[in-house]
Image: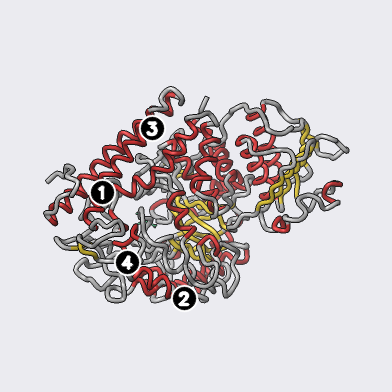
Amino acid sequence: MLKEYDCWFQKRTITPSINVPQTVISLHDGLVSAQALKEFVSGIERLLEFKPKVQKKFEEEKSAIFLGLIAGMKLPVFEKGNLCAENCCKSKHTDSFIIKVTNSQIFIAGQNENGLLYGVFRFLSLLALGSLKEGFELCESPVSQLRMINHWDNFDGTIERGYAGNSLFYKNGQFDYDDKRIEDYARLLASTGINRVSINNVNVRHKAKLLITKEYLSRAGKLAAIFRRFGIRLFLSINFGAPWSLGKLPTADPLDSSVAQWWKERAALIYKYIPDLAGFLVKADSEGEPGPFQYNRTHADGANMLAKAVEPFGGEIVWRCFVYNCQQDWRDHNFDRARAAYDHFKPLDGAFDKNVILQIKFGPYDFQVREPVTPLFGDLTKTRHVMELQITQEYTGHQIDLCYLPWLWQDIMNFDTARGEKSRIMDLLAPYKEGQSNIEGFSAVVNVGLDNNWTGHTLAQANLYGYGRMAWNPSLTANEIAKEWTILSFGHAQPSAQKIENILLNSYPAYEKYNAPFGVCFMVTPNSHYGPNIEGYEFSRWGTYHRADKDAIGIDRTPSGTGYTSQYSQKNAALFADPQTCPENMILFFHRLRYDFVMKNGETLLQNIYDNHFEGYEQASAMMEEWESLKDLIESEVYESVLSRFQRQIANAREWRDQINTYFYRKTGICDVKGRKIFD
Ligand code: GCU
């Protein structure tokens, strides 16, 4: 029976494709290794319905499963150097693992304890997927060092941009969590390779400011202890203004010695409670949060001061680059919000301490359905940095609409920054090295809450799973992940598995088609960000305008306009600046075009807008029909809850279709050439 709560850890007896011995020999002691052993034993029980016998010592067993560290496995098979000898030089990399299956023995070995845990989880998935066979050998290293989850959870229990119930961590201004649920959550994350979690909203307001006080730190310490068993270290989001709002100092100026001292003492206190704290996550000078600009200091001044406070404890500062002027005047056509991250941070390349990591949103705006990859990627060579994604569906349907995000992420991973050889995002993922534009990993705003199925929409679990998998290996495709997730969650049975996979893969293109056209962005209801409101942000302070009139739409971001395209490499700047070569799915992000501009399919821009909106609605309806065809094949509770979301999605898609089409019809007076109904 499918249990939504169990996500991709369903209890489902399978016929193994290999011989799985009855004895497991655990060769390494340690907190995470012990957890790996537990996971292995319970995973085998879940899938094969027997409990392996655990032994701590190797006694020449002919048939056994060996769990341990690569370096510590003093087994004949290792000494001969034949455990994946040739292709496993990568196994020296942090968190890597080896799996090897012979006819009577199975070896799972990690480079470190985390690696062992990841190896165990991967083995169990491969077993459930039916991909193992005798002689199987796998050696994997994560491409990203930092694989982080950001919680935007508030202390009152609400979650900023959360669509799956309240916080797992807080309620009524206090920590309030169920240890078992946190453990289950940590398991889900670790099973996809996540190694860092920030536990509170980047907007650190109200009671959350007290997180770094004694009263709250002891509960935070207990939370950290649960995650620690799964190889996950915590980050705390801090408020840059804390020295005055909490410490009662007259200033939070990063160059003031009393401020620096205050943070040093605070860090010492925090590390008493969470000795392995990964560090602080900081949103500064952004959307009303305090920051160094208030004191005429740079972001390097701000970040480095904090970096020095956590440095003695091995801590790091993850500093967000979501810094832009949110008090713009819509009348001013010269100011372009899209330029902000690059304009602020490119000049600071090389100015940050070595324990500062910049966290850069993937696009120049804000997690839109389609926007280009920000030009900072590929162009920071002296600063550590990671990419920020959003798993929670703020602009992508609030976990009411189905929107399978690895579809978008795959495009991001394939984006070529065109600075030197091998310059796609996925090629740049590597540990920091001065002089190279390596990206160290990913961070993403998570989509979970207290709902029984974690993510509101059950199929949105695929986004959580997909994020972890892609952060681990950015060259995995959206198709591969969809297949894997579907089988682990719903089983192999056909036609359901194939249909669910199809539904996932069709969902992003459908959503994109009925949303704001061709990368123009932000035609969304202000504040909530669900459903259409075409001019909702048109005359506001947020700097996200489309400026549609009766003849044309979009912002000219070429050198004859705001010059944003020039922030890219020469090759990309030329590509984007010419409407004939600019990728069409974001042509309105870069250009202001007349409605009669002829697109690649020979139709006008306007006709393409109409077509996409009719098609997007139809594709959403087709997804629902495909789901309805599974009625008797899926657990009714899951079937019904997903169906009710599809029904709401159809209503939303219809609103988008009709509002967008009517808007442009009213502006232009031009009918759909195919004569479909556009309301006036
Ligand atoms: C978006 C989002 C905010 C969030 C912000 C951020 O603007 O709407 O709720 O605080 O991003 O990333 O900090």
Residue 56 in view here:
yes
Would you say the residues marked 3 and 2 are in contact, meaning their CB atoms lie under 8 Å apart? Answer: no
**Crowd class of label 1 (few under 14; some 14 to 19; many from 20; radius 10 Å):** many
User: Please, what is the three-letter code of the amino acid marked with disc 1?
Assistant: Asp
Q: Of marks 3 and 4, which one's residue comes earlier in the chain?
A: 4
Q: Of marks 2 and 4, which one's residue comes earlier in the chain?
A: 2
Quadrant of the rendered image containing residue 562? bottom left
Task: Give the residue number, with chain letter if any, for mark 2.
Answer: 348
Task: Give the residue number, with chain letter if any, for mark 4.
Answer: 580
Q: CA distance from mark 2 to mark 4?
A: 34 Å
For label 3, the SS is helix
**Crowd class of label 2 (few under 14; some 14 to 19; many from 20; radius 10 Å):** some
In the image, which disc is placed on residue 611?
Answer: 1
For label 1, the SS is helix
Q: Is residue 252 above or below residue 190?
A: below
Residue placed at 43% from the left, 60% from the top? 362
Left or right position of 296 against 125: left
Q: CA distance from mark 3 to mark 2?
A: 51 Å
User: Please, what is the three-letter code of the amino acid marked with disc 3?
Assistant: Glu
Q: Is the C-beta of the residue carrying label 2 under 8 Å from the nearest atom of ligand 1?
A: no
Q: Of marks 4 and 1, which one's residue comes earlier in the chain?
A: 4
**Mark 1, mark 3: which one is toward the viewer?**
1
Q: CA distance from mark 1 to mark 2?
A: 44 Å
Residue 356 in view here:
no
Left or right position of 260 against 27: left
In the image, which disc is placed on residue 626?
Answer: 3
**Crowd class of label 4 (few under 14; some 14 to 19; many from 20; radius 10 Å):** few
Residue placed at 79% from the left, 44% from the top? 27
Left or right position of 6 against 604: right
**Mark 1, mark 2: which one is toward the viewer?**
1
Residue placed at 30% from the left, 44% from the top? 616
Q: In the current view of this chain or complex, which residue is farthest to the top?
A: 632
